[in-house]
Image: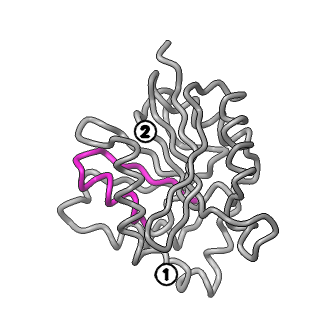
Amino acid sequence: MAGHEFDGPLGLVAGLAMAVGRGRVASFVADAAEVGPGDRVVDVGCGPGRFLREAAGRGAEAVGVDPSRRMRRMATRFTPARLRPRVTVLDGSAERLPLEDRSATVAWAVASVHHWADLDAGLAELHRVLAPSGRVLLAERLARPRGWFSHHALTWEGAERLAARAAAAGFTDTAAERHALGRHRLALVRARRPAA
């Protein structure tokens, strides 16, 4: 995951834009992952922490991983005091998750897969840190082929390829889905680490 571009001058603007207005998507992703008390959620490329706060607000322990120092600071600062005991923010990337083997029940990446430097290494890391039966959700904006944002999103064909690569990485129950949330159109890839 590149990520360090967010440490530059435009990183603050990007972080603030990502911190607001994503409540509907955050709620949808947490619902889709069935997050609740007893879960340990890893947010890969957590940015300013909107999805961390959603998980913590549902009683889960939430661990955010991001290579950008600015994003990690924003995620920490924007977390209300009542949620801070359940939120941890760490330096790392999809290809190098600073977590123990089988230590999470849920892992998600929302609008960050397109930043990963090595997709297969990132999927292998998700497989490593998830406990048996752990759930994965990879969500990106759904783009038209050759559309303006296609490099910062997934086309439907890209979502299907991502699901296939997740299966090749050892995940089961892999599926690509399309969802419309108001003006947001999402490509969502679900997967699960095998139970044994």
Residue 47 x, y percent position in the rendering: 50, 66
Amino acid of disc 2: Val
Residue 157 x, y percent position in the rendering: 75, 50
Quarter of the image with the N terminus in it: bottom right
Looking at the picture, tell me which residue is in the foreground, 168 or 132: 168
SS under mark 2: strand
- The local crowd at label 2, few if under 14, some if 14 to 19, many if 20 or more residues have their Cα within 10 Å, is many
Q: Which residue is mark 2?
A: 106
| Residue depicted at x 66% and y 69% | 4
Q: Earlier in the sequence, mark 2 or mark 1?
A: 1
Q: State the separation of the CA atoms marked 2 and 1.
A: 25 Å
SS under mark 1: helix
Residue 105 x, y percent position in the rendering: 40, 33
* Marks 2,1: beta carbons within 8 A: no
The stretch of residues the image draws in magenta is: 49-66
Amino acid of disc 1: Ala
Question: Would residue 124 be counted in the magenta stretch?
Answer: no
In the rendered structure, the answer to whether residue 184 lies left or right of residue 85 reads: right
Q: Which residue is mark 1?
A: 17
| Residue depicted at x 51% and y 56% | 179
Q: Quadrant of residue 27?
A: bottom left
